[in-house]
Image (spheres, rainbow, N blue to C red):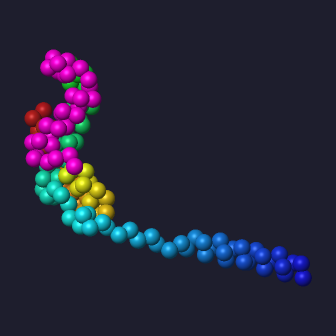
Amino acid sequence: MRKFTVRLFYVLFVIVFLESCNAPTVRIDVPEDMKKPYISEDTLVSLLVDIHLADGYLASNQKEFINHLKKIGIYKKEEGIKDFYASVFKKHGVKNPDFYKTLEYYSFHQDELLKIYERVLDSLNIKKDSIDVLH
């Protein structure tokens, strides 16, 4: 009888354990203001291309960038970088809050963001290839 009780305990334990692994799927409702992006897809692609180019420039020319900031009278690197990115947003006529709201929208629509980033990568590769041809 004792063996039967121990086996029954193990069987019940395994059943409870396996059932706990089958937790219900959590559904997240998209907020009303996230039903469409704030920035058009084409503008977002252009903006992201320029942001990534700016990142590359800052990463590869940081010393020259800091020297430039000192020349124009901005000594705080963070402020210079902030102004640098602000000029990218200004070029595309995009305001920071709209950009962040658009990113928030795409956090709910990740398949669309993936397609946008495929376009961004294509654009960056075209730019890279055109530079490679010159060298």
In the rendered view, does 29 fall on the left or right side of 127? right
User: Does residue 5 appear left or right of residue 13 in this picture?
Assistant: right
Q: Position of residue 125 (x, y in %)?
A: 18, 46
- Specify the principal SS of the magenta part: helix
Foreground of the two, 51 or 121: 51
Closer to the camera in the image, 70 or 133 = 70
Q: Residue 95: within the magenta?
A: yes
Up the image or down, 121 lies above or below 36; here it is: above
Residue shown at the point (16%, 47%) measured from the top left: 95
Magenta-colored span: 68-97
- Position of the N terminus by quadrant: bottom right
Residue at point 23% right, 56% down? 102
Residue 42: image x %, image y %?
A: 12, 56
Q: Is residue 27 visible?
A: yes
Whether the magenta-drawn stretch holds residue 70 is answered as: yes
Q: Residue furthest right?
A: 1
> At 13% from the left edge and 53% from the top edge, which residue is drawn?
43
Residue 117 falls left or right of residue 12:
left
Q: Name the image quarter holding residue 12.
A: bottom right
Up-down: is 131 above or below 18?
Answer: above
Residue 78 image position (x, y, % from top left): 27, 29
- Give coordinates of residue 90: x percent, y percent: 11, 42
Pick out the residue farthest to the front. Answer: 32
Quarter-of-image position of residue 29: bottom left
Instruction: Report the number of discs.
Output: 0
Locate the C terminus by quadrant: top left
Q: Is residue 111 visible?
A: no
